[in-house]
Image (tube, grey):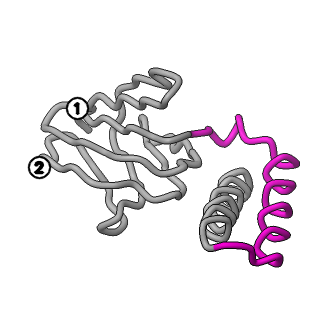
Amino acid sequence: MTKFKLKIITPQGIYQEVEIDQINLDTTAGQIGILAHHIPLASGVKVSQMNYIIDGKRTYFSVAGGFIYVNETETTLIANAIESQEEIDLERAQEAKRRAEERLKIQNDEIDMLRAQAALQRAITRIHVKGL
């Protein structure tokens, strides 16, 4: 299978640059899988699980939203935050989930509710990815 370059960038800098066979993730347009020589694409990325495949081995990540840009030879993921399955601290993710659920019960103003819902989604995604 033909490989292509994946570059993952976060606010802290380049997280990873790797040659991969395939990447799968949830965009604002739906779930997509990208192989080498994919048509050009630019899309938003949802808070979701992402994985890539190298030589048949799948590696999982939790992505806290962002953007993906694809051209024929390279894919760039600009992520708000990203953690590999190994990097996720399950206890910390469970505590973040509990805090977000508590904030949702209080029902303050709309901005607080949106932030709590976003925090809950990120925590649930991290817990899910850790369990894969």
Left or right: 66 as drawn, with respect to 112: left
Instruction: Choose the circle earlier in sequence order: 1 or 2.
Output: 2
Relative to 37, 26 lies left or right = right
Q: Is residue 46 above or below residue 56?
A: below
Badge 1 crowding class, 10 Å Cα cut-off, few under 14, some 14 to 19, many 20 or more, is: some
Q: Of the residues shown, which amino acid type is indicated by label 1? A: Glu
Relative depth, front residue between 55 and 52: 52
Residue 132 point in image, percent of width and height? 67, 56
> Quick one: label 2, few (<14), some, or many (20+) residues within 10 Å?
few
The residue that disc 1 covers is 74
Q: Quadrant of the N terminus?
A: top left
Circle number at residue 118:
none
Task: Find the magenta span and give its range.
Answer: 82-109
Name which quarter of the figure residue 103 lies in: bottom right
Residue at horizontal 34 percent and vertical 69 percent from the top: 30
Pick the residue in front: 52 or 119.
Answer: 119
- Dominant secondary structure, magenta: helix
* Left/right of residue 15 with respect to residue 101 in the rendered view: left
Disc 1, disc 2: CB below 8 Å?
no
Q: Looking at the image, which is closer to me, 78 or 131?
A: 78
Q: Position of residue 12 (x, y in %)?
A: 53, 23
Residue 85 within the segment the image draws in magenta: yes
For the point 64% across and 57% down, the residue is 122
Residue receiving disc 2: 39
Q: Is residue 41 left or right of residue 96?
A: left
